[in-house]
Image (cartoon, helix red, strand yellow):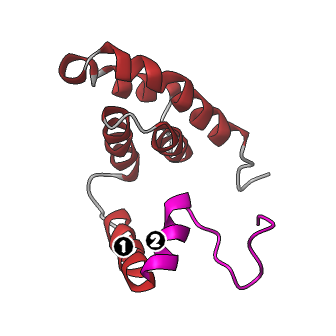
Amino acid sequence: MSEAQGPDQPDWVFPSEKHLHELAPALQEAQAAWLSAIDSLRAPDRKTHELIRLVCTVILRNPPGVERHAMLAAEVGATWEEIAGTILLTQPSFGLVPALEAFPHARRGWHAAQEQPTETE
């Protein structure tokens, strides 16, 4: 928890959530509920779900999103080869540069997932 957050302050998943909550708390809460509903989809499987979201963040050139979804994909079993291949699939339609820019962020996210302790540790 950061210094700005006290025990009664939520730990925001995305930095923008705090600002949205300050301006329009009901809107932020509805958005969080909507995202939770998307996360609860049973198909596609969770790994595919995160790889699709990874592609979207590569296309949007959103480095924090690339890192986050690479990490989440790795947490549910995606290998680095699957993550890298997913990023490379964006090239024919969206060009080389967004994919190349995404690699360091995706690698950081993948490594972060590897560094997390497993439930058996």
Q: Main secondary structure of the magenta part?
A: loop
Whether residue 21 is situated above or below residue 66 in the rendered picture:
below
Answer with the quarter of the image where residue 56 lies. top left
Amino acid marked by disc 1:
Gln
The numbered mark, 2 or 1, whose residue comes first in the sequence reads 2
Answer with the quarter of the image where residue 102 lies. top left
Q: Is residue 81 visible?
A: no
The quadrant the N terminus occupies is bottom right
**Residue 86, percent across and down?**
35, 28
Whether residue 84 is situated above or below residue 54 in the rendered picture:
above
Q: 71 left or right of 28?
A: right
The residue at the point 55 percent across, 42 percent down is: 71
In the rendered structure, find residue 20 and report the number of the disc placed on it: 2
* Span colored in magenta: 1-24
Q: Nearer the viewer, residue 47 or 10?
A: 10
The residue at the point 51 percent across, 47 percent down is: 72
Query: Can you name the residue that lies furthest to the front here?
Result: 23
**Mark 1 crowd level (few <14, some 14–19, many ≥20, 10 Å Cα):** some
The residue at the point 45 percent across, 83 percent down is: 25
